[in-house]
Amino acid sequence: MPVPNTPADPRQRDGSLDGLRGVAIVLIVLSHGWTVYPFDDSARIAPLDALLFAGNVAVTIFLVVSGYLVTRSMLSARERYGPSGPWRTFTRRILRISASVLVLLFAVALMSEVDDSDTNSQEATQKSILRVATYTWNWYVRANPLEARGDLGPLWYLSVEMQFYVVLALVLAVWGARRRHVSAALVLIVLLVTWWRWHSYDLEGWYGAPLRTTTRVDGLVWGALVGLLLPHLASLKRDAHALLGATSLVMLGVVFTSARYDIGDYMKLQGLIMAATVALFVAANQLSGPSAIKVILSSRPLRALGSVSLTIYIWHSPIFWAVSRHTSEWGNLSRSMLAVGLLAAVTVLAHRYVDGPVQRWTENIGRGAPAVENVTSADTSPPPTPHP
């Protein structure tokens, strides 16, 4: 018996969203490039110097896009399998990410034993590895800034993401058939998180506030909200191309002014503008037809970068820190070339032998006989959405 409103192939990928993630990962890598290439004279290349300081807004892109894709995947799975569907999506997601993370952590543990230039204590390394592996890393870094390994710092993103997805899977498993109610709750959460980001920064400053889960889930909530509301945004389809162009310009504007703002601006108005803009971009991207923007984002280089963005994100900081420790006498350009070359090689190997096989394997986890569930016409899902 056919299941109504079930995507034909939820594993399909959206090339333009992959391309957007490709842009984001380049900005993130550039923002952490100070490890091997100091930015002391970056003002000489203004306004391109902004590309070296756009890491936070690039992370927002990742959060919104990931929140949208995982939400659509959970909704599709719930429609097909019932309340267990969101947990199937969550299981695939955490297994895929954990496989790559555990390989990295094994490499870090091994290098800490044989690399004399690694000044982190054995205790600090062990605690850091445990917290990264259990997705509580952002809490540990926030509470123990002097003990946490600096080269694993960017992995706070994965902890915040997994903590959010646990809650999201639970909510959609229980109330997934009442999507209007969940959407209303997410609107309220967006407002609360926005206020909390501002308030927390005023109280705790540049270090403590940005590492809170409750201050960094804003992008994920925006993405989830778009995933839930997309079936009800058909009225925007006529103006989708205009909205796509407008949001693209705003995102470019935020990126190219990043060098003029600090973390305080990001925790307040800049972060709010970027999260809302990326959310509108994702909605317009799904509602619009072919366009020049989609052609650019769907270009082979950007799509390739986007498809391995998770692998790059996980490995780039440890590699950059290791290179910086062993090339202190080298020139900045030579160090940077070595770091990028090693990152490219590790990315290819890790994606081919770890992330790729695990992703293919996890696609079959939890796939069984579908469960027919009544969903009101107002909550009907849109056309197929790419697999996260």
Image: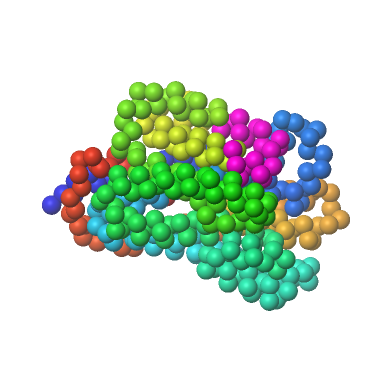
Q: Name the image quarter holding residue 328.
A: bottom right
Magenta segment's dominant SS is: helix
- Residue positioned 39% across, 41% down in the render: 226
How far across and how far down the image is residue 362, in percent? Answer: 39, 61
In this picture, residue 49 sits left or right of residue 5: right
- Residue positioned 78% across, 61% down in the render: 325
- Residue positioned 32% across, 55% down in the render: 172
The foreground one among 218 and 198 is 198
How far across and how far down the image is residue 285, in percent? Answer: 42, 33
Q: Which residues are magenta?
A: 251-269
Seen from this angle, which residue lies furthest left? Answer: 1
Q: Name the image quarter holding residue 147.
A: bottom right
Above or below — where is 64 with respect to 211? above
Determine if the magenta segment contains residue 184. no
- Residue positioned 55% across, 36% down in the render: 273
The foreground one among 359 and 245 is 245
